[in-house]
Image (tube, helix red, strand yellow):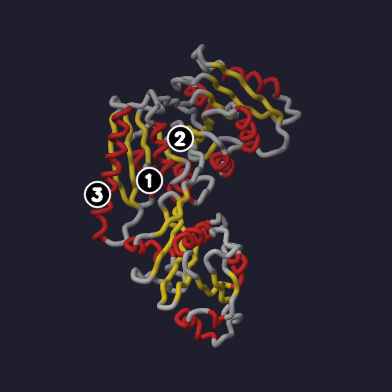
């Protein structure tokens, strides 16, 4: 799993321990030490000697060891490390940390930058020491007992499958932290569902690794706080987690909030597993029993509510989360399109277009009418709607804007109509 490892070294005792421990990880074939020397340094020869001394800490003759020594060009050290990683393509980057901070040059935001921008797994090592500047005491049993927080998202499931491949693994704790349950009567249902999904994950691991002891844990509260606390209480050797949580992944953020907090706060080594984002996006019509999903999206949208008798609602799902909806409502004298709305954090990805395209596939065999928001007229034109006079709309549809008394510009809307088979209709 970790055939090639890249280690940024500052030549400290901490990095000595880090290099020595890396040499004991099974199935590592190559270790590359990365060090930056300040230009004009009088200690250049000494620093080069120290890098080569650290290479000698790797005792396994089967492991290829080499160094990359660069002169500081005045740029940020994390950026230099990331450029090196792009060229070397390691399967793991290992960084040292003491008292919650990454060592020299990778302090604070620098470490976050590496977690955010790296295209591979990152291991943040911590060693107990005698005070802030005490000599680190190596504990290299990294993979003996792993705590894995599981939120059942695709990246977490993929990361867990990778963890199950680690040869040194003997015990695995699967943890799910329940943040909040809106109603007390829902608690038992939520807990049962979580326990069932944890049990399914455990059985999948046991089929592949019958030699590994797998324990399930359910806790409540802030995930980062609980993960850090349980790591200490259970005396795990490592916390391993996906770089993204479920909502982080579907929002396409660079690193999850919980993962970032655990990496900074945990007193145990933290392995952050990188998963490339390949979102599954699906547009489909909702069953009436699913209309509550649209109501959630519409919560702050003009007090819009679904109607199971008269509505057909089309939604866009990112993974299994609905993010955008569009509605076709049947009136006595025609079909009105409205309720086209996307959650703010998911805008800019074309999801509204996918929702309206699904609606046209479902309802487009009939003439469709709408009051289009003025700034979206071009968008609706692109899917076959054309501007019309208000008196061309059916009476029951016009009723919604009687309050405007014909002053539709003041209401910021324009009547539009879509006729099946129009030449400009891309769905025709």
Tell me how far mark 1 sits from mark 3, CA to CA.
15 Å
Residue labelled with disc 2: 271
Near-viewer residue (259 or 398)? 398
Query: Does 312 sit above or below residue 284?
Result: below
Q: Position of residue 64 (x, y in %)?
A: 55, 16
Residue beneath the point at 42% across and 37% down: 158
Q: Position of residue 176 (x, y in %)?
A: 33, 45
Tell me how far mark 3 sits from mark 2, CA to CA.
29 Å
Please identify the quarter of the rendering in which residue 333 is found. bottom left
Near-viewer residue (220 or 174)? 174
Residue labelled with disc 3: 192
Determine whether the residue tagged by mark 2 lies in a helix, strand or loop: strand
Q: Are marks 1 and 3 in contact (CB under 8 Å)?
A: no
Residue beneath the point at 41% across and 76% down: 331
Front label number (2 vs 1): 1
Residue labelled with disc 1: 151
Front label number (3 vs 2): 3
Q: Are marks 2 and 1 in contact (CB under 8 Å)?
A: no
Determine whether the residue tagged by mark 1 lies in a helix, strand or loop: loop
Q: Position of residue 26 (x, y in %)?
A: 44, 20
Please identify the quarter of the rendering in which residue 207 is found. top left
* Extreme residue in the right direction: 40
Q: Earlier in the sequence, mark 2 or mark 1?
A: 1
Q: Earlier in the sequence, mark 3 or mark 2?
A: 3
């Amino acid at each position: 799993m970790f055939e090639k490892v890249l280690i940024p070294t500052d030549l400290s005792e901490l990095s000595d321990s880090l290099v020595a421990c890396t040499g004991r990880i099974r199935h590592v074939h190559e270790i590359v030490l990365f060090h930056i020397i300040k230009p004009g340094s009088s200690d250049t020869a000494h620093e080069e000697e120290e890098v080569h001394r650290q290479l000698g800490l790797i005792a396994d003759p089967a492991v290829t060891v080499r160094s990359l020594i660069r002169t500081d060009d005045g740029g940020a050290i994390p950026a230099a490390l990331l450029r090196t990683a792009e060229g070397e393509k390691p399967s793991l980057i290992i960084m040292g940390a003491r008292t919650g901070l990454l060592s020299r040059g990778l302090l604070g935001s620098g470490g976050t930058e590496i977690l955010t921008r790296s295209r591979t797994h990152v291991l943040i090592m911590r060693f107990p020491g005698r005070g802030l500047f005490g000599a680190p005491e190596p504990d290299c049993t990294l993979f003996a007992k792993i705590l894995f927080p599981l939120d059942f998202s695709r990246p977490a499931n993929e990361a867990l499958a990778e963890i199950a491949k680690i040869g040194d693994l003997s015990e695995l704790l699967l943890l799910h932290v329940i943040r909040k349950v809106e109603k007390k009567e829902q608690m038992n249902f939520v807990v049962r569902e979580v326990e069932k999904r944890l049990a399914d994950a455990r059985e999948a691991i046991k089929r592949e690794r019958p030699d590994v002891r797998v324990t399930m844990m359910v806790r409540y509260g802030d995930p980062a706080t609980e993960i850090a606390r349980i790591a200490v209480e259970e005396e795990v050797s490592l916390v391993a987690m996906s770089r993204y949580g479920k909502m982080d992944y579907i929002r396409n953020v660079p690193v999850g909030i919980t993962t970032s907090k655990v990496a900074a706060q945990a007193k145990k080594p933290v392995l952050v597993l990188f998963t490339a984002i390949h979102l599954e996006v699906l547009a489909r019509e909702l069953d009436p029993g699913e209309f509550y999903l649209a109501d959630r999206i519409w919560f702050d949208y003009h007090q819009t509510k679904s109607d199971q008798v008269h509505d057909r609602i089309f939604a866009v799902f990112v993974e299994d989360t609905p993010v955008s909806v569009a509605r076709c409502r049947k009136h006595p004298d025609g079909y009105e399109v409205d309720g086209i709305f996307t959650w703010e954090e998911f805008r800019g990805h074309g999801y509204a277009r996918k929702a309206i395209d699904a609606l046209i596939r479902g309802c487009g065999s009939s003439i469709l009418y709408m009051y289009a928001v003025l700034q979206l007229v071009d968008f609706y034109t692109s899917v076959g709607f054309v501007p019309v006079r208000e008196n061309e709309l059916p009476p029951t549809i016009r009723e919604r804007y009687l309050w405007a008394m014909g002053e539709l510009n003041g209401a910021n809307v324009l009547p539009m109509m879509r006729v099946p088979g129009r030449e400009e209709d891309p769905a025709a």
